[in-house]
């Protein structure tokens, strides 16, 4: 019996996970991350807002992204250091044609593994509240509207390891 290589059309390789501090990002990668974010948040969601907010290159900022086998950025998020301690996750997005493959969950798992038990917050679009809840985030305040989109503040409550 001969072993056959899997058909890449039926079983594409898992996207590669990348993480980088802001200082170590090259210009082409930063451009690709920003482009995906603008494509999703500004164009697709029809929400004109200042996507380039000055926080992407702050000391301590870390970027996470997944790439396809051709190097195309499929999903991304950024992790900011919060004033006073802890972290803030933001700008979580996946290309329209790459959704439904668990890429956002993979990024969230990677970032939460990296922050360990440190406090972590985010502002979730209300339609994504359940997505973040699957990772241990709970709503911590009232719903608010940002750039025309309903959001809720959420904080990470890591589940203790069962003994």
Image (cartoon, rainbow, N blue to C red):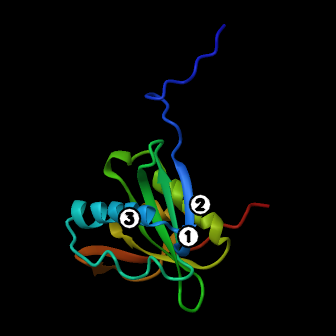
Residue density around tag 3, few if under 14, some if 14–19, many if 20 or more, within 10 Å: few
**Residue at the spot of label 2:** 110
Where residue 9 sits in the image (x, y, percent)? 43, 28
Q: Which mark is residue 31?
A: 3
Label 2 to label 1, Cα distance in Å?
A: 18 Å
- Asked if the residues shown at circle 3 and circle 1 are in contact, with their CB atoms under 8 angstroms apart, the answer is no
Q: Is residue 92 left or right of residue 63?
A: left
Where residue 32 sits in the image (x, y, percent)? 38, 60
In the image, 4 versus 159, the foreground residue is: 4
Element marked by disc 3 = helix
Q: Seen from this angle, which residue lies furthest bottom?
A: 84
Residue drawn 38% across the image and 64% down it: 31
Q: Quadrant of the N terminus?
A: top right
In the image, 66 versus 30, the foreground residue is: 30
**Residue at the spot of label 1:** 24
In the image, 89 versus 130, the foreground residue is: 89
Q: Is residue 103 above or below residue 1?
A: below
- The residue mark sitting in front, 2 or 3, is 3
N-terminal label among 2 and 1: 1
Label 2 to label 3, Cα distance in Å?
A: 22 Å
Element marked by disc 2 = helix
- The residue mark sitting in front, 2 or 1, is 1
Q: Is residue 107 left or right of residue 35?
A: right
Label 3 to label 1, Cα distance in Å?
A: 13 Å
Q: Is residue 69 above or below residue 87?
A: above
């Amino acid at each position: 019996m001969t072993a056959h290589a899997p058909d890449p059309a039926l079983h594409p390789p898992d996207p590669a996970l990348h993480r980088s501090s802001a200082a170590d990002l090259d210009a082409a990668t930063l451009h690709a991350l920003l482009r995906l974010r603008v494509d999703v948040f500004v164009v697709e969601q029809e929400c004109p807002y200042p996507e380039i907010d000055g926080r992407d290159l702050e000391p301590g900022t870390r970027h996470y992204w997944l790439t396809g086998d051709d190097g195309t950025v499929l999903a991304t998020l950024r992790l900011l250091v919060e004033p006073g301690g802890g972290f803030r996750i933001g700008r979580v997005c996946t290309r329209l044609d790459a959704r439904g493959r668990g890429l956002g969950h993979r990024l969230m798992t990677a970032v939460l593994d990296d922050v360990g038990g440190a406090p972590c917050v985010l502002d979730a679009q209300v339609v994504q509240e359940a997505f973040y809840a699957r990772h241990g985030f709970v709503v911590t305040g009232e719903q608010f509207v940002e750039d025309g989109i309903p959001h809720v503040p959420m904080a990470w409550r890591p589940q203790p390891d069962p003994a």
